[in-house]
Amino acid sequence: MATNAELQIALKEAGRLVRGGRLLVIGSQSLLGTFSHDELPAEATASLEFDVAVFGDIDSQAADRIDGALGEWSDFHDAHGFYVQGVDVDTAVVPAGWQDRVTRVPVLEAPDVEAVCLDPHDTCAAKLARNEERDRDFVRALVDASLIDPLTLAERITMIPDDRLETARKRVVLAFVRSLAPR
C-alpha cells in the first residue's frame, strides 16, 4: 500500500536528482496529493510505482535520470519497496485545463522542490482513457468510496481532446462512467 510518506520520499529524491524544478505526479499515486492513504481504498494504493514528470523536460533527460536512479529494480527500489518512474508531462491523456486543477504538495524535507499532483477526477479520466479492466476497477473503488463523483468524471472525460482520445473509445468510457452513477 502506497502512503503519503512514500510520496514525500519519492518527491524529495526526484527533486534532488533534477536539482529542484517543478514536479508533476500522475497515475494512481497522484491521489496521495489530495487524500490520505487511510482514506483511499486498497485498489487506489496498490501500485508500487510513482509516476513523476518534470515540467520543462523537453528531451526526457530528467525522466531518464529519475528512472535510472529511482526506477524499478534500482537500489532505491530495493531499499524502499517502491520505485519512481520518470515520465513526460504529456504521458497521461488528461482533460483540457488540467493544469488549473492540480493540487500543490509541499515537499517537507525539500522546500526548493515544487510538486503538484493531478486532480483526482483528472487522474481517473486519464486512467479510463486506457480502457483497461484494472483501471475500471480502480475508478469503481473510488466511486464506491464516494471519493470520485461519476458526473464530474463524465464531464472531465468529455474534456479530453479528440486527438488524445478517439471518439469511439470516449463513448465506451463514458458509458462505463454513467453506469457508476446512482439511478
Image (spheres, rainbow, N blue to C red):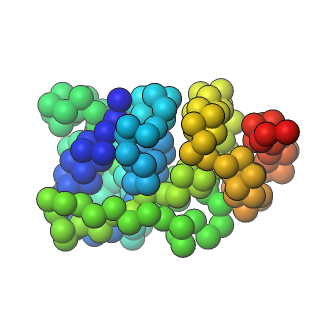
The percent coordinates of residue 54 (x first, y second) are 36, 62
Q: Residue at x 61, y 70 (%)?
A: 97
**Above or below, comparing residue 82 to residue 104 in the picture:** above
Q: Residue at x 60, y 42 (%)?
A: 146
Q: Nearer the viewer, residue 145 or 154?
A: 145
Query: Seen in the image, is 25 located left or right of residue 148?
Result: left
Q: Residue at x 28, y 64 (%)?
A: 106
Q: Nearer the viewer, residue 7 or 56?
A: 7
**Above or below, comparing residue 106 to residue 63 in the picture:** below
**Above or below, comparing residue 16 to residue 142 in the picture:** below
**Above or below, comparing residue 3 to residue 1 in the picture:** below
Instruction: Residue 46: name its quadrant.
Output: top left
The percent coordinates of residue 151 (x first, y second) are 75, 52
Query: Seen in the image, is 148 located left or right of residue 108?
Result: right
Q: Nearer the viewer, residue 93 or 112?
A: 112
The percent coordinates of residue 158 (x first, y second) are 77, 58
The percent coordinates of residue 61 (x first, y second) are 31, 58
- Name the image quarter holding the C terminus: top right
Q: Tell how many labels.
A: 0
- Name the image quarter holding the N terminus: top left
Instruction: Residue 60: name its quadrant.
Output: bottom left
Mark yes or no: residue 57 visible: no
Q: Residue at x 46, y 38 (%)?
A: 40
